[in-house]
Structures are given as C-alpha cells and as structure tokens.
Image: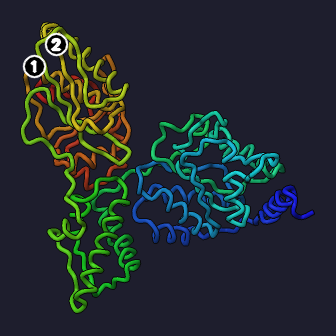
Amino acid sequence: GNNSPEYGMLYDYLDFMTSLAWRKEAPEKIDLKEAEAVLDREHFGLEKIKRRIIQQIAVMNLKKQQSGSILLFVGAPGTGKTSIGKSIADALHRKYVRVSLGGVRDEADIRGHRRTYIGAMPGRIMDGIKKSGVSNPVMVLDEVDKLSSSYNGDPASALLEVLDPEQNSTFTDHYMNVPYDLSDVLFVCTANTMDTIPEPLLDRMEVIRFSGYSASDKLQIAKKHLLPKAMESMGITKDMLEVPDPTIEEIISGYTMESGVRGLKNRLDTLCRSVAVHVEQDDDKKVTVLPEDLSELLDMQPIRHGRKLTETKPGIVTGLAWTSAGGEILFIETLFTKGQGKTIITGQLGDVMKESAQIAISIVKSMFPEKEKLFEENDLHIHVPEGAVPKDGPSAGITLTTALASLVTGKKVDPTVGMTGEVSLRGVVTAIGGLPEKLMAAARAGLKTIYIPEENIRDLKDVPQEVKDQLQIIGVKEVSDVLKANNILDA
C-alpha cells in the first residue's frame, strides 16, 4: 500500500533519478571575444586568471568537448574566487551550481548513503547536478581546504573519484547505485590555502593563485562594482550621494585590513545605510562623504595597521609575513638577559618558525665566533609581538638571523628596512611564497628597502607596478649579503 515506509523511500528515489539530466549536451562553440567581455564586465583585474580561462575555452572549442583540467583557485578571502566561477558559467552559457565543502567530514556527504539506511540521501555532488538540471554545469566546489577526515571515511578520497577525468565518467553515488557520467562537468575548486589539501587531490588540479588587490585596484573595484551595487540595494541614487575618491581610499587604508574586498564591500554597505538615514530625514540636499566623516558614519575607529617603527635599537628587525587575510609586517625583537644560555621564544610561534629561530642562532654563533661568550653568559629571549596572532612558516628565517646578528654586534638596522626569506644552515637564503601580498604590506607600512631571496626575483612580475615603484627591492643569495648591506658585517 502507498502508506508503507518502503513506498515513500522508493518514490523519493525514483523522483530523484527521473529529475536528473541523463542526456549529454552537445558542446556549443563559444565566442572568445564575447567570453572575455563577460569576464571583464564582472571582475576588475585578475588578468592572469582570465587569460587562463580563455585558454580553457579555446581548447574546448577545438576539441569539441569538455577538456580535462580541473582548476583550483587559491587566495585570500574576498578576492573573487567563488564569484569568478559564476562568470565562467555565464561566459560558457552553462548552468552554475555551487557546492560548499567547508566542514564536510563524512564520505557519504560526497558519495551519498546506501538506500538501506533510513533517511538515505544522495551526496552533494549528485544533488548539485540535480539542482542544475543539466549534465554539464560549471560546478564550484568551495573551500576544498576545509575538508576534514574523520572516522566516517575520508571525504578527500571520495572527491578524488569525482575529479579524476579517468574515473568520473562512471561515478557511482551510493544512493543512486548506477553510474552517472560527470565528465562534462567543469569543476572549479576554491581554497584559502594549499597546506591542508591532500597531495593526491592537488595532483589532479591546476593551481591558479589569486593574489590580493593593490590599493588602486580596490579603488577601481569600489567605484565600478561595490559602491553602485550597495547604492542600488539601498535605493540611493546618484543625486543623493557622492563618495569622492579620497574617501574611498581612506576606507581602504584606514577601515579594512585584507587582501580581498569583502571588508570593503561591508564598509560601503554600512556607509550607504547610514547615508539612507540622512537622506530620509533631509531629502533636499545631496550628501557628500568626506574622509573625516567616516568614523561616525561607519561607527568604528580606524584600524591600526603595522606601521614602520620610528626609532629602533639593536636586535629589532622588521619582517614580512603572509597571513590568510593577506600580507602584514611583523617585528622580531631579541634581547639578552643575564642567565645560563637558555633560549626563550614567545609570541605564539608555530613549530616551523621555532626551528627557524634555532637555525638563526646557530648561524649567528658560527658567523661571530668571538661573541660565543655572550650566548653562554646570557639567556636569549626572542619575541614576535601581537601574541594573539599565531605565526608560522619559514619565511622569517632571514629576519630572525639579522635581528640576532644586530643584537650581538650592537649595530642597529634602519626601521625602513624589511626582509623576507627562508634560511638554510649554510646561510643560504631560499625562496618563499606570498610575495605580492608581503610587498603590498611593506608599501602600506611605509617601508623603503626590502630584501627578498634571489630566487623570488622572477615572481616580481606578479606584483603591481605601483607597489614596486614605492620600494627598493633587493635580491639576496646569502645571509651575509643582508648583513653587509646593513653594516652589521664589514663588507
């Protein structure tokens, strides 16, 4: 009878199976010029990324089929990773569907439950296919870096099967129990960092980095996209409100702290809401927002960014760090106190950074053998301020080493000098990541001279020209290059 539980389950199953698109769509030829126009209309900048997408479309046109590579967009929050997925779908005239993987711990979330379980459901991938109504949507898999494995199996390995072009033409969801062809789906994955993505999964994807936006990029994005959208959604017209460029620049530099533009969007929304009240109460005049009105209209104090030190003493050096929200400058402070040669490290440093500190100590001991006594008769304290922010990674190696060398020789390092680089025990400075963000932070903080690893010089092409114009950037091969340049070692 139709009131048995079996009936309901079977009905749901058949309903799901029949509402899937089983028919293969014929690939349509896409006009590259038009596709480019769609991408440019929706997103400012991101040239490298757009070029890569256009290449993908060209290949698909030539092969008359969906081509194999899976794109992984990596970058700070708010840099446009998810939203460009939507633009790709528009450019390809395809349906768009977004599947969020943040916090998925269970394989069944991706591959479905067997129907013997009560409350069995298809996995998120097939659910997305059903929502899209076609067999070839553009599917954005958001937050691939937040997959976590647990006792319920490993969702990352289930995802492998989805993304592997060799296997995914016969992908079998446990709930459906029949193979479905996913080979026409264009998968785009997004992540904030690559560190937590399992190796085998990374191998199948082509990584495209979204570096942060420079201040002038953000100004354009605010003027072309964010402000008009905010005004439209609050019902404010152009004749009611004017936000001059200096005001937008002040919001960017003083009220947000990010690589992306999500915070900027929120501030502009807040601004429009505050203005709506003024317009409503006093409707005959136009509101012009000046930079000094901002703390009242946004109801917040300006954010203090890392600013360069005004004066300094031996043992303190400015480094550059990459956080998931973009670049920051950080100060490394070192101090000798009477003691027995212990090392104290504070400032919530991760294991990798603690190891960098040990390497720095060994290098400095070997470079300045005459200072050996200092280390035996004192305790060494290394501190990286802003203790609440966890810091890790090897790229402070050169900063730690320079700070210690400055401490033992008593020679100061100019506060407008910054540096980044990993250091090996031989004293060789090796390459680091996140260079564009780090240099943007350096320019914002008012630093003048930046030492970077020689191997990273080739990455300067990814750094906005306006940032390069503000800084003198020097490539170094060895620790001694930095020490000589800063008069800690005699040249």
Q: Amino acid at mark 2?
A: Phe
Residue for point 15% across, 25% down:
484
What number is the disc on residue 364?
none
Q: Is residue 474 visible?
A: no
The answer for how far apart the CA atoms under marks 2 and 1 are is 9 Å
In this rendering, is residue 482 above or below 219?
above
* Visible residue check, residue 465: yes
Report x, y in % for residue 451: 23, 36
Circle 2: element type:
loop
Q: Position of residue 301 (x, y in %)?
A: 19, 59
25 vs 133, nearest the viewer: 133
Tell me which corner region of the image, top left, top right, bottom left or bottom right, holds residue 277: bottom left
The residue carrying mark 2 is 368
Colouring scheme, one of rainbow, by chain, secondary structure, one colour: rainbow
Q: Residue furthest bottom?
A: 284
Residue 215: x percent and y percent? 27, 59
Q: Residue at x 13, y 24 (%)?
A: 406
Q: Which residue is mark 1?
A: 409
Tell me: residue 371, above or below residue 258.
Answer: above
Q: Residue flagged by tag 1: what amino acid is it?
A: Thr
On the image, which quarter does residue 490 sit in?
Answer: top left
Q: Quadrant of the C terminus?
A: top left
Secondary element at tag 1: helix
Mark 1, Cα crowd under 10 Å, few <14 / some 14-19 / many 20+, is some
Tell whether label 1 touches label 2 (CB within 8 Å): yes
Q: Nearer the viewer, residue 366 or 361?
A: 361
Classify 10 Å Cα crowding around label 2: few (below 14), some (14-19), many (20 and above).
Answer: few
- Mark 1 or mark 2, which is nearer the start of the sequence? 2
Residue 252: give x, y in percent of width and height. 26, 61
Residue found at x 68% / y 57%: 185
Query: In this rendering, would 410 be left or right of 289?
Result: left
